[in-house]
Amino acid sequence: MKILNFSSTILKNGPALQGVAEIIACSEQSERNVAVFPALNGVEDYLIRATKLAAAAEDYPAQLQSVKDLHLGLVQELIPAREQAGIITPLQIMINDLEDVLKGVQLLREYTRRTLDLVLSFGVQMSCSLVAGYLQVCGLPAVILDARRIIRTNDYHGNAVVSREVTSKLISAHLNKENNGLPVIGGGLACAESGATTSLGKNGADYTASLLAEALNAGCIEIWTDEDGVMSADLAYVKEAFIIPELNYQEAMELAYFGAKILHPRTMIPAVEGNIPIQICNVNKPGERGTLISSRAADWPYDIRGIASFSGAALVNIEGGGMIGIPGIAARVFSALAGAEVNIMMISQASSEHSICLVFSQDEADRALRALTGELDPELKNGSIRKFEMLKDLVVGAVIGENMRGTPGISGKVFSSLGRAGVNVLAIAQGSSERNISFVIGKRDQAAALKTIHNTFLTGEL
């Protein structure tokens, strides 16, 4: 069995859906599959805007009409006229229900994560309804299974935590049956024990695929996207970048965390624990290999596997002589940021205990600064901690690879190359695993940094 997961970016027009059907048809000839689909490309943005406009008592119907036009336009393009009614009717019912929800949002002036989860669920349901109907017309035995019946979470909306044990049992109960067709399941959609609709957050469809694969002991997860695979660096900055044919799970998680176009690290955990390979494939080049992620990658001739970078970062430096030898300062800092729901991407601390450097998304910078100022107000007032220094428009770069472990001189080569390129490094961090060296630089140095490191370590296409 394989789990076929199709990216939202490829679900955008008739030819793309025809390509999806061809991929599924070829795969169905050899084994039983499960297909995972998120909302159509662009639909989530329309729905978010519609919800915000409705909550502000502004004109939202245009956004809703765009969602309707996209789905019904694809039906008219792909489905023979005599069979359109059977697909249009359920879509129209969902559109009417969505309109009722948005009217309620407008009346209550309510824009919450719970509300947004419910609104976004319509996009996923409509995508599955359309795709399943089209697959049936193509002669494929597609059967919709609402993900809310099989994936259980807590009540944290927007990025719910999955109850893995309960979810695994539900998946097995519903899908470990013979002759139940090709299950079509909405990616990223889930349900809390209370019955409320929840979502699995960023890359939720990938997480859905991973949960399904673990519960069903699948042989492989195929992620179908419009990318050729995982690149050795961002092509926007390094034109010499090439496809990495294989990665191990740890390398993939590190690259993903620091911005590579790949699965979100959290979404991989069920597949990692189940030792299930993940194949990244380009829907436009179905015969090409792409990138395979597994427990053991093939031998690699270079010291590093790849370079990733995340722009839009901010850095705050907490510094002061009053921190030296005082227990609990770091715990208070981390607790304050956790309470403000700020995700710390990187930490660097001087051995003298004189300073702590924290890096997080720029979107969270103001919230982080308020939390830190509130928690450390006594120390700021008595001068034991200096006024916080906040830097924005930064980039976090990461050099990653299994071959870095136990290899002398990697750090020296990284920072020597950055120095030769005139790149100023603001902060550095390296984990004990030795497979990641991270650094913070200014946005203007991003291209130079990635190019020089790529040229230093990765020369020539494999």
Image (cartoon, grey):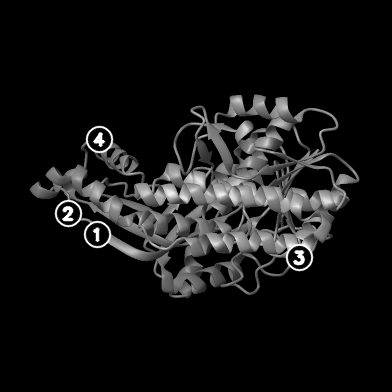
Where is 13 relative to 305, above or below?
Answer: below
Kindly report the distance in space between the C-alpha atoms of the residues bearing marks 4 and 3: 63 Å
Is 155 left, or right, of 303 in this rendering? left
Of the residues under marks 3 and 2, which one precedes in the sequence? 3
Q: Is residue 280 left or right of residue 378?
A: right
Q: Are marks 2 and 1 in contact (CB under 8 Å)?
A: yes
The type of residue carrying mark 4 is Gly
What crowding class fits label 2: few (fewer than 14 Cα within 10 Å), some (14-19), or many (20 or more)? some
Q: Residue furthest right?
A: 29
Question: SS of the residue at dot 1?
Answer: strand
Q: Give the x, y percent position of residue 362.
A: 37, 59
Pointer 4 residue: 328
For disc 3, the marked residue is: 77
Q: Quadrant of the C terminus?
A: bottom right
Which sits earlier in the primary sequence, circle 1 or circle 4? 4
Residue at the location (60% across, 38% down)? 269
Residue 386, labelled with which disc? Answer: 2
State the separation of the CA atoms marked 1 and 3: 56 Å
Q: Given the image, on which type of amino acid does mark 1 rest?
A: Glu
Q: Secondary structure at mark 2?
A: loop
Q: Nearer the viewer, residue 10 or 294?
A: 10
Q: Name the residue located 80 percent from the left edge and 27 percent from the top edge.
A: 177
Q: In the rendered structure, which disc, 1 or 3, sits on the residue that comes first in sequence?
A: 3
Say if residue 264 shows up in the picture: no
Amino acid carrying mark 3 in the image: Glu
Which residue position is annotated with label 1? Answer: 389
Q: Residues within 10 Å of mark 4 (few under 14, many from 20)?
A: few
Q: Secondary structure at mark 4?
A: loop
Residue sitting at 35 percent across and 57 percent down? Answer: 56
Work out how far the residue at label 1 is from the one at label 4, CA to CA, in angstroms: 21 Å
> Could you classify mark 3 by the number of other residues whose Cα lies within 10 Å: few (under 14), some (14-19), or many (20 or more)?
few
